[in-house]
């Protein structure tokens, strides 16, 4: 089967109904329409770093991966420890940094230093248990982290009570 010129083939080899130029033109129209709508709906106020509960602060959040050595459960401590590692989930640790000005004063190197300190505090390697950092991010106080969202949803669904939620959040802040 021949594909018409300017119709770029699809996976099934039959070509498209619309030419590539038409698809691009329609895509641009849609993006322009969305932009115009946003401009028309703007109320003229500049965005601020303040939310109803006060100024926005930032925190450093690291995510870790935990592995447990199942071979060490039956190890008598003599010779080499048997190796049978299994992934056991992970943890999220948070450290408050301060407002936007504090973050700017720290700069990228200062934030990296805080990250290294927090990562060193929560990294562990031994014959029984490994925990290491798999990611980190700078999160504003008006955004939920993954664990905060999970705990909120568990509370809403009745899987945990408020005391358990607060206890789990306090552990992550250490």
Image: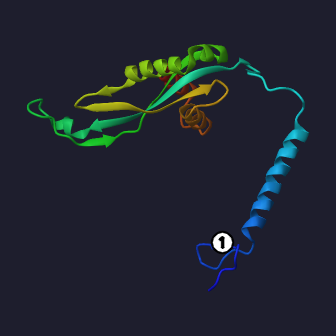
Q: In which quadrant is the N terminus drawn? A: bottom right
- Residue at left offset 23%, top offset 43%: 84
Q: Where is residue 15 in the image (x, y as percent from the top left)?
A: 66, 76
Q: Where is residue 112 in the image (x, y as percent from the top left)?
A: 48, 22
CA neighbours of label 1 inside 10 A, class few (<14), some (14 to 19), many (20+): some
**In the image shown, does 77 or 133 lie closer to the viewer?**
133
- Residue 109 horizontal side relative to residue 86, left or right: right
Q: In this view, does 154 lie above or below 28?
A: above
Kindly tell me whether residue 174 is visible in this rendering.
Answer: no
**In the image shown, does 8 or 40 lie closer to the viewer?**
8
Question: Which residue carries the number 1 mark?
Answer: 8
- Residue at left offset 31%, top offset 32%: 130
Q: Is residue 43 above or below residue 109?
A: below
Q: Where is residue 158 in the image (x, y as percent from the top left)?
A: 58, 37
Q: Is residue 102 above or below residue 64?
A: above
Q: Residue 75 is drawn in which quadrant?
A: top left
Badge 1 marks a residue whose secondary structure is: loop
Q: Where is residue 95 in the image (x, y as percent from the top left)?
A: 52, 19
Colouring: rainbow
């Amino acid at each position: 089967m021949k594909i018409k010129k300017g119709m770029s083939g699809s996976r099934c080899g039959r070509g498209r109904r619309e030419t590539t130029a038409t698809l691009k033109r329609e895509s641009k129209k849609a993006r322009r329409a969305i932009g115009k709508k946003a401009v028309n709906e703007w109320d003229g106020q500049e965005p601020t770093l303040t939310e109803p509960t006060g100024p926005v602060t930032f925190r450093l959040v690291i995510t870790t991966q935990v592995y447990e050595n199942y071979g060490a459960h039956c190890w008598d401590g003599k010779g080499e420890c048997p190796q049978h590692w299994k992934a056991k989930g992970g943890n999220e640790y948070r450290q408050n940094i301060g407002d936007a000005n504090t973050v700017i004063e720290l700069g990228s190197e200062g934030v990296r230093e805080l990250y290294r300190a927090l990562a060193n505090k929560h990294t562990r390697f031994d014959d029984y248990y490994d925990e290491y950092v798999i990611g980190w991010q700078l999160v504003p106080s008006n955004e939920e982290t993954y664990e905060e969202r999970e705990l909120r949803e568990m509370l809403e669904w009745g899987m945990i009570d408020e005391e358990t939620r607060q206890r789990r959040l306090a552990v992550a802040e250490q």
